[in-house]
Image (cartoon, coloured by chain):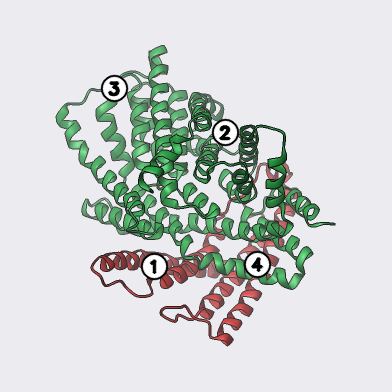
Amino acid sequence: MDSLYSILRFISKALNLVAGVTLTLMMFLTVADVSLRAAGHPIIGTYEIVALSLAVVIGFGIPKVSLDKGHVIMEFLLEKLSPRGKDVMNTFTRLLVIMLFLFIGYNLLNVGAEFHASGEVSPTIKLPFYPVAYGVAVCCFLECFVFIFEIVRIWRGQYE
Amino acid sequence: MNEVTVGIISLALLLLIFSTGIELGFGMAIVGFVGFGYLNGWSSAMNLISRDIFDVITNYGYTVFPLFLLMGQIGFNAGIAVRLYNAADKFVGHIPGGLAMATVIGATGFKAICGSAAATAATFASVAIPEMDRYGYSKTLSTGIVATVGSLGCIIPPSVTLIIMGILTEQSIGQLFLAGIIPGLLIAALFIAIIYGWAKINPAIAPRGMRSTWKERGRSLPEIFWVLLVFCLVVGGIMQGYFTPTEAGAVGTFAVLLLTVIKRDMTFKKYVSSVSESLRTAGMLLMLIAGSAIFGHFIAVTNIPQKTADWVVTLPVNRYIIMILICFVFEIGGSFIDDLAFLILATPIFYPAALKLGFPPLWFGIVICVVAMIGVVIPPVAICVFVVKNITKVPIGQIYKGVTPFLISLILVWGLLFLIPQMVLWLPSVFFK
């Protein structure tokens, strides 16, 4: 189980790296576009590339945010529970979130399939939308694994 | 059950699910999904959650968040805040309470490039408090001011809170940035006045520091100049229509990165750390926004925002009283959940009511952001106070005691906004004719 958790951490870190590189490229591309626009030669399609890059930045970055417990939670009521009560409550919320991301991931696969079938692309440089939908769906399933491991860690007494 | 009843039950369910310790964004998505499914059918609800998530994370408008967050993190990791504090210290450190005033001036300057309240509180807790300790400042004053200055990031541009407000209420982010300048500077000035008055009444709490020579002061000026230049580039660029907010974020980030690399303040490791922290905060924020988008679509189906707006205008009460009550809802909700999360959740519900009552959208945005400023320093969820406590190990009760006088100035400015709305509306009216 520990080695599986290490693999999950490794994948999340790798995806986070891709998200970080994408954010950096997003910045440089936008600056280049602004500079060249001032000279009368804007980079065509920057708007679309930057918008779709956000999916990579956020979608690929989310598993690491969840692993690092970077989301906002309201914990002052949870803190009043006994350790066993906290474990039960945390397991319950993890299960809810797993179901949520399973639904989202499954439906994003459908959305991706619809985009693929209809050939939907961005208006200017014709970037296809379906790889983005598929990519984010995969990240949603990875997010499910993050929360499954959280449940395992809760009942192993390793969850803080 | 009619739509409104379902909506009201769902709002209660939302508070219940928040109390289970679930991630707030995911909680909003779950309740929104269930409510929408109940009213419109489950296949529509399935479609809604995937479409909303996809729309949020491929929306050009939201690319502004990671870029502005990265700009602030680069400034934070490159030590810009420290040098701004040192520069301010050279000018005011020798007067009673001078080091605390330098904290306010340094933080106000740092806010010009960093929109994070917690990052500012963390920086100044590590830098300014040890310096104030060295000169024998009271811990109540030093921790109180450091915990409070972080809140300035809610309205001094380029504030992430203002960007969120702009997106939620479909207002110009550039106009909101301008609208936040006068109240933000007034609050900073009031902080300084309170420190001066406090130090005059009780000189033992804030002894004088060393007086710097004019040569030393002159040498510290370039630091202020560069930050002002980046600020003018970002805010001026949006104002003049040269950039979209996303482009301003990218250009500002690039300028800060270039500046810190040239000055050898930025290493590859620091850059990686900046990107990593930006991704973390951006991910957290966009999940909140995606959750609120799903919940918002459900709430729109229940007609609650419209009915609230219709009901509010029929109340036989002065509209300012209603607005004060709305602010209390934000304050109480934000105190128990999280100010930013509650702002994202509640703004779409109350904004139509504020418009129907005849309040200008810009004014509403700034008033609610000042309410959020108060929220980040009052219990039980006071993020800036927690940051200062973790770094300094000073008891939380003592920090709250130090925060109280500054809290009064925040409440005073909030009240002034009701009396003199031009504080908010004047600058945008001058630059956006």
Name the residue carrying label 3. Answer: B209
What percent of the width, then of the height, locates residue A31?
31, 64
**Are the numbered discs 2 and 4 placed on the same chain, yes or no?**
yes
Residue to which mark 2 is pinned: B378
Tell me which amino acid carries mark 3: Gly
Q: Position of residue A140 (x, y in %)?
A: 60, 70
| Mark with earlier residue (2, 4) | 4
Measure the C-alpha gap from mark 1 to mark 2: 38 Å
Q: Specify the chain shown as red.
A: A
Q: Is residue B199 left or right of residue B5?
A: left
Q: Secondary structure at mark 3?
A: loop
Extreme-top residue of the structure: B201
Marks 1/4: CA distance?
28 Å
* Chain letter, colour green in render: B
Q: Is residue B428 visible?
A: yes
Q: Farthest left residue? A: B215
Of the two numbered discs 1 and 4 in the rendering, the one whose residue sits closer to the viewer: 4
Callout 1 crowding tier (Cα within 10 Å): few <14, some 14–19, many ≥20: some
